[in-house]
Image: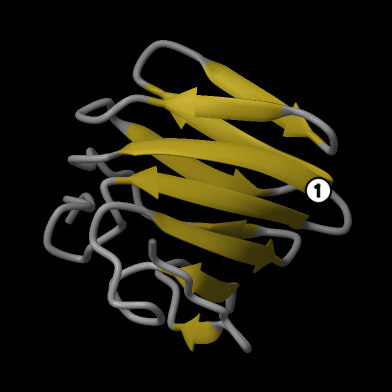
Amino acid sequence: MMIKHIQSPTIIEAAGNKKKIIEEFFGNVNSNTSNISIARMKSPEGWEEPGQKPEFDEYTVVLKGTLKVTTTNQEYHVAAGQGILIGKNEWVKYSSPFEGGAEYVAICLPAFSPDTVHRDE
């Protein structure tokens, strides 16, 4: 049996045009966990990051505000209380263009890694 009590998250620098806070609870950085990452994100109004085509599934649950999720074929506005799954190798771009920004939890399987996210140039 394994038990890991996380006392606090690690703050990780985020990609994008504005400062977004990433609080990693589980993942490669905070818990040395490569099979899953769980992080709380706080993105300000007007934030956007480059598109990406990651080698991991990303499950997102929005806690506050609305997150804009753009894929190759569609645009989604994921509001507080809603979630979205983006499968691995799907192109996706996340942003929070709406008033108040967004706060959400992202779970990546396997864990997020700068080497496997494949951001647009």
Q: Residue at (50%, 36%) from the top-left corner?
A: 59
Q: Is residue 61 above or below residue 102?
A: above
- Residue type indicated by callout 1: Leu
For this orientation, the residue located farthest to the top is 73
Q: Residue at (66%, 29%) from the top-left corner?
A: 83
Q: How many marks?
A: 1
State which quadrant residue 75 falls in: top right
Q: Residue at (38%, 78%) from the top-left corner?
A: 31
Q: Where is the N terminus found, in terms of image quarters? A: bottom left
Q: In this rendering, would 82 be left or right of 40?
A: right
Colour scheme shown? secondary structure
Q: Which percent across, then down, holds residue 58?
A: 42, 38
Q: Is residue 86 above or below residue 107?
A: above
Q: In this rendering, would 29 be left or right of 22?
A: left
Q: Residue at (53%, 72%) from the top-left corner?
A: 25
Q: Mark 1: give few (<14), some (14-19) or many (20+) Cα within 10 Å.
A: many
Q: Is residue 88 above or below residue 104?
A: above
**In the image shown, does 3 or 44 lie closer to the viewer?**
3
Identify residue for label 1: 63
For this orientation, the residue located farthest to the left is 115
Q: Is residue 71 above or below residue 99?
A: above
Q: In this rendering, would 80 be left or right of 106?
A: right
SS at badge 1 = strand
**In the image shown, does 73 or 7 lie closer to the viewer?**
7
**In the image shown, does 32 or 113 lie closer to the viewer?**
32
Q: Which percent across, then down, holds residue 22?
A: 55, 73
State which quadrant residue 114 falls in: bottom left
For this orientation, the residue located farthest to the front is 1
Q: Which percent across, then down, holds residue 55?
A: 18, 40
Q: Which percent across, then down, holds residue 32?
A: 28, 77
Q: Where is the C terminus found, in terms of image quarters? A: bottom left
